[in-house]
Image (cartoon, rainbow, N blue to C red):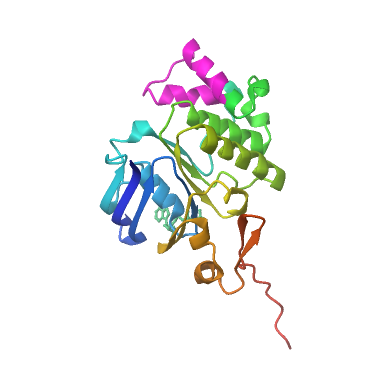
Amino acid sequence: MEAVKAESVSIYYDSYTAVENLTFKLEEGETLLLLGPNGAGKTTLLRTLAGFHRDYKGKLLIFGKHPLEARDLISYVPQSHYLNERVPLTALEVVAMGGIYKRGFVHFKIPKKILKSAEEALEFVGLRHIKNKLFKELSGGQKQRVLLARALISNPKLLLLDEPLSVLDPSARVEVANVLGKIKKEKDITMIITTHDINPLTEIGDKIMLLNRQLVAFGTPEEVLRDEVISRVYGPLSKAVRIGNRLYCIIGDVHIHRGERR
Ligand SMILES: Nc1ncnc2c1ncn2[C@@H]1O[C@H](COP(=O)(O)OP(=O)(O)OP(=O)(O)O)[C@@H](O)[C@H]1O
């Protein structure tokens, strides 16, 4: 079954067109890596799929349903999680919140059943041992894994992840990428992951979309990670490199401005 179907979708902020005339399909169980420069419309697309942003034209279906009707099937992990870290929640409570809010009401006492599911979700991301630690005291990689556990507790069919690797150091990136790989392998979840750094994730990407307000390329890593495709967005210094049986992307978007000559 098609998990996501977009036909001629344009997304707006008032008169500004953030994404223009986008058409693509994603099959159930596939993982899509969504790549594009700053302002390309990645977050906008994710929020529209999640049903949070509604100003769009065209046809958008999530498992055959309008995004608003599909909300129970979707978990969305925003880029900067909007968790108020001044509230002293433990890792377990943060994960449990994912089970509570989905049901549309807030408990003061978390039901035992939800706490048990939260523990299982923490176990899945390898963090059961820190369940009673305060969320704000965790490392960046641990926080991101807790947020993944929170997104998993409601058993979504579509997981939308906005920059899950950003602001992490290289070892934490690998840590989080490994958990994403485990989700891909062990759970039947369709995923869309936006990222600036595609390299830790190329192994789990079935499809890659290169977006720059319009669709630049969509296909398998073999089809998209080619010099002539990525250089359309990232310039002539961009390269696709194969190491072993994996493709990596070197993005040549670093410009060193030398001082003017006198
Ligand atoms: N709430 C908003 N109101 C008006 N314009 C917006 C709003 N949010 C985003 N935009 C604009 O829409 C365009 C796409 O933004 P978006 O955040 O989707 O890009 P992105 O690819 O996720 O960028 P980044 O990689 O920097 O996160 C940008 O030009 C941005 O300024």
Please state if 173 lies on the left or on the right of 186 as rendered.
Answer: right
Q: Which residues lie in the magenta part?
A: 93-121
Residue 176 figure quarter: top right
Q: Does the magenta stretch include residue 151?
A: no
Using the image, determine if residue 70 lies above or below residue 244: above
Is any atom of residue 184 visible in this view? yes
x, y percent for residue 184: 52, 38
Please state if 166 lies on the left or on the right of 99 as rendered.
Answer: right
Residue drawn at x 49%, y 62% is 223
Residue 67 figure quarter: top left
On the rendered image, what quadrant is the C terminus found in?
bottom right
Q: Is the magenta stretch mostly helix, strand or loop?
A: helix
x, y percent for residue 209: 45, 57
Using the image, determine if residue 255 lies above or below residue 102: below
As drawn, which residue projects farthest toward the front?
A: 245
Residue drawn at x 49%, y 30% is 152
Using the image, determine if residue 116 lies above or below residue 207: above
Residue 106 figure quarter: top left
On the rendered image, what quadrant is the N terminus found in?
top left
Residue drawn at x 29%, y 50% is 55
Is any atom of residue 84 visible in this view? no
Residue drawn at x 56%, y 55% is 196
